[in-house]
């Protein structure tokens, strides 16, 4: 009895931190945990991006596994409160680590992890970026566990009778290899970080021209729900802000280049009052202008 008590206490103290994850029901059998519109820190502990789950019937499919082992464990606990079943499949939309460091928990519990092909060639990072920003308690047991199934181009999977269409884009959009998940029977697209809303997006690793074009492709699926990687809007018009912002900065930067302004002048004039009210404007906007300038100055189209 004494040793049992010890084990219980030890287990309890192993995870002294708890994420507060409340699933939002999007539609029958589809739910999301919407992350906070913030930069990762020791308060949110990486809970800044969206993680969604689909009840396939016998088990769950998870789209993006979140920022840590503990996040995934807490997310699964919240899923089990809805329907007590395991997670059989996890899909990683892209390589940014707030979206897939929960893989370790799901893998340990038998899930198949599916990702875009870039994951096959990704070297392990030491230390993992997330580790530097979130608390030790939240990061506990987190390791880089990569997908074992890699997707190239368009592939339709049959997961417990549910058709799931994956598109892995072979060009730089938000990153070098972004993937979207389309479930026709549910009329839903999980767009990963190709769609941001309620905050300013991150163009750092992206290409502005490709990003604007791919939004048309996503919208052309004409699905009822489009769920991004950041932001809690989930209806078909959830792409509006991403598109408007990208088009606005593209227009501004091209005009600036046309006028012969260099990067310093361009950045100095880059204030956009239309977007200033958005979360993370201060942190991201100037950097986005700079990335857009670097892409557009060479006439990349
Ligand atoms: Zn991202």
Image (cartoon, grey):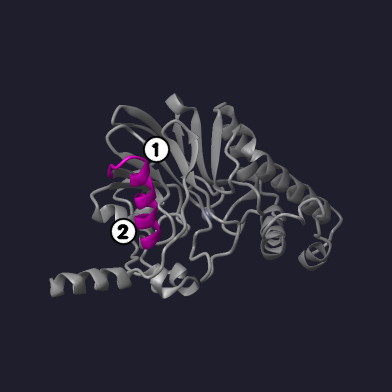
Secondary structure at badge 2 equals: helix
Please provide percent x and percent y for residue 284: 67, 61
Q: Is residue 192 visible?
A: yes
Task: Residue 58: name its quadrant.
Answer: top left
Which quadrant would the C terminus be assigned to in this image?
top right
Based on the displayed image, in which of its 4 quarters is residue 143 positioned? bottom left
Q: Residue at x 58, y 45 (%)?
A: 232
Marks 2 and 1 close (CB-CB < 8 Å): no
Q: What residue is pinned by disc 1? A: 54
Whether the magenta-drawn stretch holds residue 85 is answered as yes
Residue 294 relative to residue 164: left or right: right
Type of secondary structure dominating the magenta stretch: helix
Q: Which segment did they paint magenta?
A: 70-86
**Which residue position holds label 2?**
104
Q: Sequence order check: which comes first, mark 2 or mark 1?
A: 1
Q: Residue at (33%, 51%) from the top-left corner? A: 147
Q: Where is residue 78 in the image (x, y as percent from the top left)?
A: 39, 49
Mark toward the viewer: 2 or 1:
1
Q: Which mark is residue 129?
A: none
The span from disc 2 to disc 1 (Cα, nearest Å) is 19 Å
Residue at the far right: name it. 259
Residue 134 horizontal/vertical position (percent): 47, 70
Q: In which quarter of the image is the N terminus?
A: bottom left
SS at circle 1:
strand
* As drawn, 208 above or below 102: above
| Residue 57 painted magenta | no
User: Circle 1: is it few (<14), some (14-19), or many (20+) Cα within 10 Å?
Assistant: many
Q: 18 and 278: which one is in front?
A: 18
Residue furthest front as drawn: 1
* Number of marks: 2
């Amino acid at each position: 009895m004494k040793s049992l008590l010890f084990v219980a206490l030890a287990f309890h103290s192993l995870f002294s931190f708890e994420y507060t994850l409340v699933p939002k029901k999007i539609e029958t059998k589809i739910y999301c945990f919407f992350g906070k519109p913030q930069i990762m820190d020791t308060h949110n502990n990486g809970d800044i991006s969206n993680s969604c789950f689909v009840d396939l019937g016998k088990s769950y499919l998870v789209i993006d596994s979140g920022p840590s082992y503990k996040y995934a464990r807490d997310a699964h606990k919240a899923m089990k409160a809805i329907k007590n079943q395991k997670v059989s499949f996890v899909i990683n939309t892209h390589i940014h680590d707030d979206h897939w460091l929960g893989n370790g928990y799901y893998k340990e519990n038998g899930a198949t992890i599916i990702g875009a092909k870039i994951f096959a060639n990704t070297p392990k990072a030491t230390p993992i970026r997330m580790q530097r920003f979130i608390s030790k308690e939240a990061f506990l047991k987190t390791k880089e566990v990569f997908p074992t199934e890699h997707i190239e181009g368009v592939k339709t999977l049959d997961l417990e009778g549910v058709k799931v269409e994956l598109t892995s884009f072979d060009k730089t959009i938000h990153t070098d290899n972004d993937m979207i998940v389309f479930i026709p029977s549910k009329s839903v697209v999980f767009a990963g970080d190709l769609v941001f809303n309620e905050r300013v997006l991150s163009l750092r690793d992206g290409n502005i021209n490709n990003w604007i074009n791919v939004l048309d492709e996503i919208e052309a699926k004409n699905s009822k729900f489009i769920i991004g990687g950041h932001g809690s809007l989930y209806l078909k018009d959830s792409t509006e802000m991403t598109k408007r912002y990208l088009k606005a900065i593209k227009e501004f930067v091209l005009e600036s280049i046309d006028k012969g302004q260099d990067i310093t002048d361009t950045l100095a004039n880059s204030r956009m009052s239309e977007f200033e009210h958005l979360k993370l404007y201060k942190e991201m906007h100037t950097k986005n202008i700079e990335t857009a300038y670097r892409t557009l100055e060479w006439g990349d189209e």
